[in-house]
């Protein structure tokens, strides 16, 4: 095998962004803390540009600890380059702000992550940027919503909470025909379950907080672009915003990245086992998981993804709030909290009804989002079964 031959994903996860030879053979990239960077000459100082990729000019603009993580994520996603920021929301915010100005119109999927909607409704609106929400199932028909002042289409596949799959290639073809950029929240897939740039995406955003880190102890976001031009545009916006991520967080993300493949394999298998079990329960109306053969988005998932993670939802048959509380308040293994992607399992009652505008969520039963962690799935099933028994007895 030659040094330049293509490597499988598992191999990339182990070797991407390491460069041990530059650090005395140390296996993991070292943590380099810095604020001030010293220059050897006036000429070197004058040549330094904060936007230049990989250049160490000031601590806020990054050190090699961050640059090597960015190199690894870009290789895994198949993009030109990656920028790491302080959170997933920071990644979303800086990416959108980099491309909009007053008077612009943007299209955002109605199934988007709530903080994205909050950015659009509470912040962009004040500065004269109009957001129009669209049905996540629109596909190529999004062409009918594109105006002369439309600058970007925001996608999320599968959708937050409700897990609708989007036909990204069809959306990208329609958008690019009008010189409109396509941005994707690719967090569910992590860097390895979907190749967004092969689907026509211009920018892929992820909450590295989730599966890249994998241990529920770091906040970070990643922004990967298809082109150098877009990378530099977004980097300038990040510098203006003052956003920065510390080298310790980047180090932990690098370490988490090495086990991403084996963790996701377990999340996938355990998640499907729990999802299939839930489909047999009388308390459950339907399970929202694109890897299930009867899911409406299964064909798109099978075409565009190489696997699934541990995050999905199910809709319960209608119950009283006291019954729901009796179920979720006393779980032994499932914790109740926000975020996901760590080693632990989580349960979160949610209600999409009040935030949808382009589509209607008309389920009467409670939506429950699960993150299936790395515990034995039989133990997780037993915990859910005990919860259903408490629900019935309340």
Image (cartoon, rainbow, N blue to C red):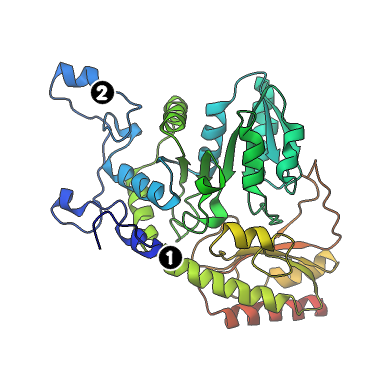
Residue 29 lies left or right of residue 99; in this view the side is left
As helix, strand or loop, the secondary structure at mark 2 comes to loop
Q: Give the vertical position of 282 relative to 94 (above or below).
A: below
Q: Residue 65, position in %: x, y?
A: 29, 45
Where is residue 36? Give x, y as percent: 24, 29
Q: Quadrant of residue 81?
A: top left
Q: How crowded is mark 1: few (under 14 residues within 10 Å), some or many (20 or more)?
A: many
Residue 261 is tagged as: 1
Quadrant into which the N terminus falls:
bottom left
Viewer-proximal residue, 134 or 30?
Answer: 134
Q: Nearer the viewer, residue 167 or 84?
A: 167
Could you say which is closer to the camera, residue 67 or residue 152? Answer: 152
Res 50 label: none
Left or right: 313, with 376 as reference point: right
309 to the left or right of 69: right
Q: Residue at x 40, y 49 (%)?
A: 73
Circle 2 sits on which residue?
Answer: 48
**Residue positioned 35% across, 50% down in the render:** 72
Q: Would you place residue 58 above or below residue 322 in this image?
A: above
């Amino acid at each position: 095998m030659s040094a330049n031959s293509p490597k499988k994903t598992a191999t990339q996860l182990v070797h991407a962004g390491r460069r041990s030879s530059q650090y005395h053979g140390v296996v993991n990239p070292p943590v380099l803390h810095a604020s001030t960077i010293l220059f050897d000459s006036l000429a070197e100082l004058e040549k330094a540009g904060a936007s230049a990729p990989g250049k160490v000019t000031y601590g806020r603009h990054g050190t090699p600890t961050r640059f090597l993580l960015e190199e690894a994520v870009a290789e895994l996603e198949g993009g030109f380059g990656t920028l790491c920021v302080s959170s997933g929301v920071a990644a979303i915010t800086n990416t959108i702000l980099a491309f909009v100005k007053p008077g612009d119109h943007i299209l955002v999927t109605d199934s988007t992550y709530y903080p994205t909607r909050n950015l659009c409704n509470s912040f962009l609106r004040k500065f004269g940027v109009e957001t129009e929400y669209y049905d996540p199932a629109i596909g190529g028909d999004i062409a009918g919503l594109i105006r002369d002042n439309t600058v970007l289409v925001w996608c999320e596949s599968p959708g937050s909470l409700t897990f609708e799959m989007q036909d990204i290639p069809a959306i990208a073809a329609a958008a690019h025909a009008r010189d409109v950029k396509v941005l994707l929240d690719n967090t569910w897939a992590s860097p390895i379950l979907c190749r967004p740039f092969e689907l026509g995406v211009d920018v892929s955003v992820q909450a590295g907080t989730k599966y890249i880190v994998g241990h529920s102890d770091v906040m970070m976001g990643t922004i990967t672009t298809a082109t150098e031009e877009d990378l530099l545009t977004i980097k300038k916006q990040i510098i203006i915003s003052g956003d920065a991520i510390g080298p310790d967080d980047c180090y932990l993300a690098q370490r988490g990245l090495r086990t991403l493949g084996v963790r996701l394999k377990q999340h996938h298998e355990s998640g499907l086992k729990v999802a299939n079990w839930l489909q047999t329960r009388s308390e459950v109306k339907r399970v929202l998981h694109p890897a299930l053969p009867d899911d409406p988005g299964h064909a798109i998932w099978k075409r565009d993804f190489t696997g699934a993670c541990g995050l999905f939802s199910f809709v319960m048959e209608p119950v009283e709030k006291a019954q729901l509380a009796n179920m979720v308040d006393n779980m032994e293994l499932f914790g109740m909290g926000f975020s996901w992607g760590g080693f632990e399992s989580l349960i979160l009652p949610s209600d999409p009804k009040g935030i949808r505008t382009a589509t209607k969520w008309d389920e009467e039963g409670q939506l429950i989002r699960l993150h299936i962690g790395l515990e034995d799935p039989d133990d997780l099933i037993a915990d859910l079964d005990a919860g259903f028994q408490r629900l019935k007895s309340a």
